[in-house]
């Protein structure tokens, strides 16, 4: 196959993520004219990574992190955005790895890209751990922004299987708002280091200013 065709094929496949809406927002019936796509999530995670590296001065290869984040959702081109409430981590990993291998198999650098994807998934290196935390924290922040816009009605969640999770129900029954529940759930589940935990808690406790400040 021509290199030119490889470039276009890969681009067209990745471009599909612009049209894959994040499943979490669909499940919670987020009411908004535009709801975040997977491609927009990837962009958000990359920008968050730059900010976290800047302010907390992590000793990491930030360019490797940005590359890692760019490809970390490639599998969703094939399998869609599956949440932790609908599939086991083990099964999702298998499906994702098979999908990523298929997507990048024709690229000259396919093996290197696949190795980087697997490094992210293994969460063993400093860059992978950092990228993973950025991935999860970005979702917390986006949830808070939607909550501030009052995009979610907790009384209209009859068909939401995420809302039926026992831990989620417990948090909501304790009087938590949608975003407070979401963020606290993440704090319990994800291995945030001290810096990520502080930012997560800040998001939970404070209104986010969405205007540009000098």
Image (tube, rainbow, N blue to C red):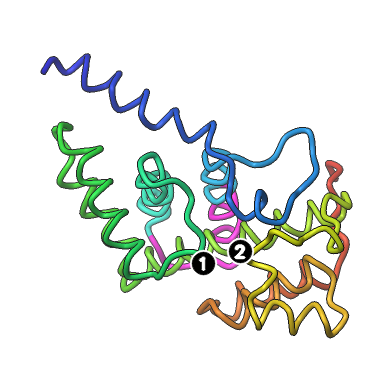
Task: Determine the CA span between mark 1 and mark 2.
Answer: 6 Å
Q: Which residues are magenta?
A: 47-60
Which residue appears at 11% of the width and 18% of the height? 1
Secondary structure at numbered mark 2:
helix
Which residue appears at 44% of the width and 28% of the height? 15
The secondary structure making up most of the magenta span is helix
Task: Check if mark 1's residue and mark 2's residue have beta carbons within 8 Å.
Answer: yes
Return the residue nearer the eye: 90 or 202: 90
Verify whether residue 138 appears in magenta.
no
Secondary structure at numbered mark 1:
helix
Total marks placed: 2
Which residue appears at 49% of the width and 64% of the height? 86
From the viewer's perspective, is 130 left or right of 189?
Answer: left
From the viewer's perspective, is 54 left or right of 169?
Answer: left
The residue to which callout 2 is attached is: 137
38 shown above or below 90 = above
Q: Position of residue 6 (x, y in %)?
A: 21, 22
Q: Position of residue 183 (x, y in %)?
A: 70, 71
The residue to which callout 1 is attached is: 133
Quadrant showing the C terminus: top right
């Amino acid at each position: 196959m021509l290199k030119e065709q490889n470039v276009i094929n890969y681009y067209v496949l990745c471009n599909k993520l612009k049209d894959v809406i994040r499943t979490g927002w669909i499940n919670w019936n987020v009411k908004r004219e535009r709801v975040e796509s997977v491609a927009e999530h990837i962009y958000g995670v990359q920008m968050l990574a730059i900010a976290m590296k800047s302010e907390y001065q992590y000793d990491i290869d930030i360019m490797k992190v940005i590359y890692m984040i760019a490809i970390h959702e490639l599998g969703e081109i094939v399998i869609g955005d599956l949440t932790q409430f609908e599939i086991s981590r083990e099964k999702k990993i298998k499906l994702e790895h098979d999908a990523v291998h298929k997507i990048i198999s024709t690229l000259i650098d396919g093996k290197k890209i696949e190795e980087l994807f697997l490094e992210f998934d293994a969460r063993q290196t400093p860059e992978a751990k950092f990228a993973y935390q950025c991935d999860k924290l970005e979702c917390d922040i986006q949830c808070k922004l939607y909550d501030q816009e009052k995009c979610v009605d907790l009384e209209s969640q009859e068909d939401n299987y995420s809302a039926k999770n026992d831990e989620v129900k417990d948090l909501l029954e304790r009087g938590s708002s949608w975003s407070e529940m979401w963020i606290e759930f993440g704090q319990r589940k994800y291995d945030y280091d001290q810096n990520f935990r502080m930012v997560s808690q800040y998001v939970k406790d404070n209104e986010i200013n969405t205007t540009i400040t000098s």
